[in-house]
Amino acid sequence: MNNNGVLKVKNKKLNQGENATGWGFVLPYFASFFLFITIPVILGILLSFTYFDLINTPKFIGLNNFVNLFTADDVFMQQVLPNTLKFALIVGPVGYMLSFLLAWLLAQIPQKPRTVLALLIYSPSMTAGIAMAVMWRIIFSGDSSGYLNSVLLSLNLIDSPIQWLQDPKYLLNIMIIVSLWSSMGIGFLAMLAGVLNINEELYEAAYVDGMSNKFQEIFYITIPTMKPQMLFGAIMSLVATFNAGAIGVQLTGVNPTPQNAGQLIVNHMDDYAFNRWEMGYGAAIAVVLLIMVYLFGMAARKLFGEKE
C-alpha cells in the first residue's frame, strides 16, 4: 500500500474515532430528551383523543375533547383564553423589551457594578415560587396590615382595605405586575452576553460613516448583530409566559382562582387533570397550549431568525 493509501486509512480511523467521541457526548442528552420530552409529548397528544380518569382504561373518543373545549367550555372561551392572551401579549413583549433595555444599559457601565446589578436584576427569577408568592401576598394582603393597603389608608386614598387578591378587577393585573418583576431570567443574561460580545470596531466604523446617536447604534448595529441572542430571548420569554400559571394559584391559594379572574390555560389544565381527574380533557388543553406556543415561536423565528 502506498503512502496515500496509508494516509486515507489513518484519516478514516481518525474520523471514526472523532464521530464516536461526538456521539458519546451527544447520546446522554439525546436519550434524556427522547425519554423525558419526546415520549411524554407523544403520549399527551394520544391521550387527548381519549377519556381517561386514571382508574379505567383510556377510551378513544376522537375529537370530542377538542370540540367540547371550544364549544361547551364557557370558562375556557370566555375567561381562560382571553386571560391567557392578555397576560401573554403584555408580559411577553414588555418583559422581552425590558430584558433588552436593561441588558443594553448594563453594558454601558464598568464591569464590577455591572456584575452586581445583573445579579440583582436576575435574582427575582431565581426566587419564583413559594418565596415570591409569600412576599407579594404580604404586599397585597387584603387587611389593613398589608403594605399597599397600609400606605393607601395612611394617605387617605381609600376608606377601607381592598381585597386585592380576591377581587376579579385586580387579580390579573397583579399577576402581570408580579410576572414582569420576575421576568429577567435566562433571556436577559443571553442578551447581556450578546451586547457585551459585539465588536467595538463596528460602532467606530458606523460613527465614521455618519451614525450620530445611541438610537441609531441600537437599531443599526446592536440588534442586527445579536439576532441569535434576541431569538433565544424571545423563545424563552414565550415559553415562560404561556406556561405561567402557578402565579395566580400561589397568590390566591386556590385553583380555580376567585371567579376564574386569574385563570390561565395552565391552571385550567391542572384543574381538569389533577383536581377533577379528567386526564384526557386536560391533555387536550395541553395540546392547544403547545400549538399556541409553537405558532408564536414561529412568529419569533420569522422576526429574529437569520434570513439565509
Image (spheres, helix red, strand yellow):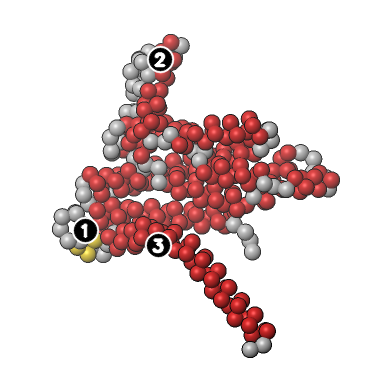
Q: Position of residue 52 (x, y in %)?
A: 21, 57
Sequence-earlier tag: 2 or 3: 3
| Label 1–label 2 contact, CB within 8 A | no
Residue 145 in the image, given as x and y percentages of width and height: 36, 15
**Callout 1 secondary element:** strand
Compared with 296, 19 (above or below) is below
Of mark 1 and mark 2, the one earlier in the sequence is: 1
The span from disc 1 to disc 3 (Cα, nearest Å) is: 30 Å
Residue at 57% x, 45% y is 190
Residue designated by label 2: 150
Q: Nearer the viewer, residue 70 or 59?
A: 59
- Mark 2 surroundings within 10 Å by alpha-carbon count, few (fewer than 14), some (14 through 19), many (20 or more): many
Task: Determine the secondary structure under disc 3.
Answer: helix
Question: Which residue lies most toward the left here?
Answer: 56
Residue 208 spot, x, y in % from top left: 84, 45
Q: Please indicate whether residue 111 sits to the left or right of residue 119 in the image.
A: right
Q: Does 260 sit above or below residue 58?
A: above
Q: Quadrant of the C terminus?
A: bottom right
Q: Residues within 10 Å of mark 1 (few under 14, many from 20)?
A: many
Front-lying residue, 6 or 66: 6
Choose mark 2 or mark 3, whichever is in front: 3
The residue indicated by pointer 3 is 31
Q: Which residue is mark 1?
A: 51
Give the residue at x 42% y 19%: 148
Estimate the x, y position of residue 8 in percent, counting from the top left: 63, 81
**Amino acid type, label 2:** Ser
Q: Nearer the viewer, mark 1 or mark 3?
A: 3
